[in-house]
Image (spheres, helix red, strand yellow):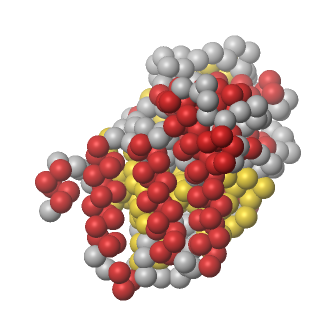
Amino acid sequence: EMARSTGILITLLAVVFTAHALTPSKECLRAGGNLETCLRGVASDPVAESVVNSFKEAFGTDPAAVFLAPGRVNLIGEHTDYNDGFVMPCAINYHMVAAVSPSDDDDVIAVATDYKNEQSRFSLSNIEKVKDPFWSNYIRGVCKVLKHDRGLPLRGMRIAIGGNVPQGAGLSSSAALEVALGSAANHLFAGGLGPREVALTGQKAEHWVGCNCGIMDQLISAVGKGGHAVMIDCRDLSTQPVQIPDGYSVVIVNSNFKHELAGLDSEYNSRRAQCEAAARHYGATALRDVTSEQLVAGRAGLDEETYKRARHVVTENERTVAAAAALRAGDMRTMGRLMAESHASMRDDFEITVPPIDALVDIVSAVLASNPAAGGGGVRMTGGGFGGSVACLAPE
């Protein structure tokens, strides 16, 4: 009733999360002509099957490799990753798929299942961004980084991509695509890259496309663990799994208010520039190195808006560390309080929420508060902001 009164179209995306392995089975990498074998390990996944079928229709043969990579939801730690800080996301049971075969030429031909099997073609000797089809830029970016930065001996490829990670919902569909494709190419061309290197490749590709993101989205897609969130130190890329307590589920609610992060003039990139300016003001390598006490003591000379951006990052890092401890201890009331504080900070200091998101948070908060005997839980916006989804930790 509250949702209807606000005019919000709500989509319940997931009530549990699991991380699909990047390589669902060794047989999947040697798919040959056996689709059933290829899909073993992903429970005859309909998304993977659809992508494989698109590949076969476009190129008349089976793919040599099929890789899946999950989307993600971030429980806490927003816009802290590119400030060398802490984040605590988890992989979800929505994923992107890349079906790939090498070719004997220098051309990459890609078909997008989610865009009515639209095709894009480019040469590895001249990789440039295009306005249309825009989705192909993520493929171009991954190929460019693998070839020119990682030194992989890429040849041409035939590629089909698709997935069920909702685009524009703040669940990192582009990062999942980058990790899936990067993993497939790394396998086919014996690149020897580990999960972290694949994630860094995807991050650099995203920068090339136009969004100066941190490492969180690609890294959780590469290292996610079922039944756990993952505490990530974005400075040294160390990871620590944190189990979600029994009796709780991660619920994602999509506002259907789509955001757009790519583009040099985006609000996302503006926030990053403000954070970097604040770090220079405090004489720090990154805002991760600034404490709350230093933030207040050294604010003279910093404009109010940039100070608010810095205050969000500094306090969000503190909240994320405390949230990991609360989750490990099963203290869901503290976890809920920290998630609420995180959302308020994103709304008031970082200014990246929108009315539909705030309304959803209010609705879910009221539901959680109406059942105190359940033991607590929390809700906040998740993702880069300006739309997307809210993440809830709720008693089952």
Residue drawn at 34 percent across, 57 percent down? 361
Residue 163, position in %: x, y? 48, 48
Camera sees residue 211 = no
Q: Is residue 154 left or right of residue 218?
A: right
Q: Is residue 286 left or right of residue 128?
A: right
How many labels were placed on the picture? 0
Residue drawn at 63 percent across, 56 percent down? 318
Residue drawn at 55 percent across, 56 percent down? 76
Residue 179, position in %: x, y? 65, 44
Camera sees residue 107 = yes
Residue 149, position in %: x, y? 81, 27
Q: Is residue 375 left or right of residue 91?
A: left
Quarter of the image with the N terminus is bottom left
Quarter of the image with the C terminus is bottom left
> Is 339 rendered above or below residue 183?
below
Residue drawn at 32 percent across, 64 percent down? 364
Which residue is more in the foreground, 364 or 319?
A: 319
> Is 261 rendered above or below residue 29?
above
Residue 67, position in %: x, y? 64, 50
Q: In the displayed orientation, state which residue is furthest to the bottom.
A: 373
Which residue is more in the foreground, 323 or 102?
A: 323
